[in-house]
Image (spheres, helix red, strand yellow):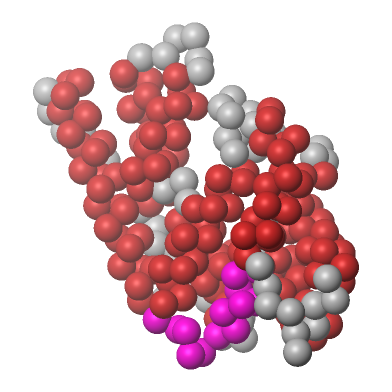
């Protein structure tokens, strides 16, 4: 009988691996102390929400493991972070082999991790549903209300920060990002539209607060 996976143990392993990276905030968002592990936790929660509708159609355990390990590749602190997906697959394989996890499932999980950054395959018919859900959950983070707060945080690190400059930063990043819905599953597309509406309304409201009128978005 296979030993049951302890997901809390996996989270602890990944948290410890990412500790050094999170300490300095990482290269991708180096103006703020952005925690890659906290990102992982948020993506995991989004994954659970999206996976609810497909519990009978997917390998839930493999998806959970892949989600927990999907960004562990950042722990290597390479200058080229574009390799983090491939690096993460290697690190996950090492861990799963160390606990003698089934080889076939290990291959599938590591493939999900290695491909999760290739968002161009999201709408391909041959893309496994597990990979679709992992990608969608990953895309949800740093969007909507959370994206707005992060944009303000990043802009606030500048010496010449102002309400106006924060608004322009939000319009340049969060607002622009939300206008095109990249999701594939019905629930994900609906959630994205809700986040888009919130972002649009926030920008409209802040524009009125600052200028007394709403400029064209």
Indicate the quadrant containing the C terminus: top left, top right, bottom left or bottom right: top left
Q: Main secondary structure of the magenta part?
A: helix
- Residue for point 45% across, 62% down: 46
Left or right: 61 as drawn, with respect to 3: left
Residue 199 or residue 45, whichever sits in front: 45
- Residue for point 51% across, 18% down: 157
Residue 43 or residue 157, whichever sits in front: 43
Q: Is residue 52 visible?
A: yes
- Residue for point 20% across, 21% down: 210
Residue 197 x/y as whole percent = 24, 52
Left or right: 51 as drawn, with respect to 132: left
Indicate the quadrant containing the N terminus: top left, top right, bottom left or bottom right: bottom right
Residue 71 x/y as whole percent = 68, 54
The number of discs equals 0
Magenta stretch bounds: 53-65
Q: Compared to 21, does 49 lie above or below?
A: below
Q: Quadrant of residue 160?
A: top left
Left or right: 39 as drawn, with respect to 94: left
17 in the magenta segment: no
Residue 119 x/y as whole percent = 59, 64
Q: Quadrant of residue 122?
A: bottom right
Left or right: 165 as drawn, with respect to 133: left
Residue 188 or residue 24, whichever sits in front: 24
């Amino acid at each position: 009988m296979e030993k049951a996976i302890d997901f809390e143990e996996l989270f602890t392993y990944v948290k410890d691996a990412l500790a050094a990276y999170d300490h300095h905030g990482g290269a991708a968002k180096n103006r703020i102390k952005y925690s890659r592990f906290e990102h992982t936790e948020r993506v995991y929660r989004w994954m659970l929400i999206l996976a609810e509708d497909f519990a009978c159609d997917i390998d839930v355990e493999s998806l959970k493991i892949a989600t927990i390990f999907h960004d562990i590749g950042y722990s290597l602190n390479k200058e080229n972070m574009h390799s983090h997906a491939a690096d993460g697959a290697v690190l996950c394989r090492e861990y799963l082999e160390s606990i003698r996890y089934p080889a076939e499932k290990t291959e599938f999980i590591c493939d999900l991790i290695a491909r999760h950054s290739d968002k161009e395959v999201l709408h391909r018919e041959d893309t496994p549903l597990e990979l679709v859900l992992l990608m969608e959950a990953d895309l949800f983070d740093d969007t909507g209300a959370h994206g707005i707060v992060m944009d303000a945080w990043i802009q606030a690190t500048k010496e010449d920060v102002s309400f106006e400059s924060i608004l322009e930063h939000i319009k340049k990043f969060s607002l622009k990002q939300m206008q095109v819905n990249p999701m594939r599953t019905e629930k994900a597309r609906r959630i994205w539209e809700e986040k888009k509406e919130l972002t649009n309304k926030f920008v409209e409201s802040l524009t009125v607060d600052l200028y007394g009128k709403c400029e064209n978005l």
